[in-house]
Image (cartoon, grey):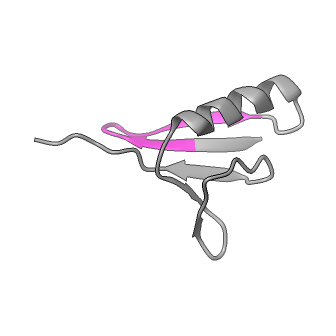
Amino acid sequence: MATLIVMDHNGDTRHEFNAVDAQELLKAEARFKELTGAVLRRRPERLTRMFDPTADETLFFPRLVGG
């Protein structure tokens, strides 16, 4: 299982998907494209703009509105 982790006001939201299931992979890629500020956690960490279905985790830091 791979995981898309979206940081939010409550901490984080995790979206798990099976990278070998075509339907789940399409949904995960669509969610990836909706989010901005994507950071792929690998060693070393790197910024990515392309969906990588082989990543175990992808961590997103969307812009949070404060005030």
Q: Position of residue 37 (x, y in %)?
A: 46, 51
Q: Measured along the vertical axis of the image, is residue 36 above or below residue 44?
A: above
Q: Position of residue 45 (x, y in %)?
A: 59, 71
Dominant SS type (magenta): strand
Return the residue found at the far left.
67
Instruction: Left or right? Give the position of 47 relative to 16.
Output: left
Percent x, y for residue 23? 82, 23
Q: Is residue 26 magenta?
A: no
Q: What is the total number of numbered labels drawn onto the structure image?
A: 0
Quadrant where the image shows the N terminus? top right
Query: Does residue 11 appear left or right of residue 19 in this picture?
Result: left
Q: Quadrant of the C terminus?
A: top left
Residue visible at 61% across and 39% down in the picture:
32
Residue 27 in the image: above or below residue 4 = above
Q: Is residue 9 magenta?
A: yes
The region drawn magenta spans 5-17
Q: Quadrant of residue 27?
A: top right
- Give the residue drawn at x 65%, y 30%: 30
Direction from residue 7 to residue 19 in the image, left or right: right
What x and y, as percent, mark residue 31? Answer: 60, 32
Q: Which of the 4 quarters of the picture holds residue 40?
A: bottom right
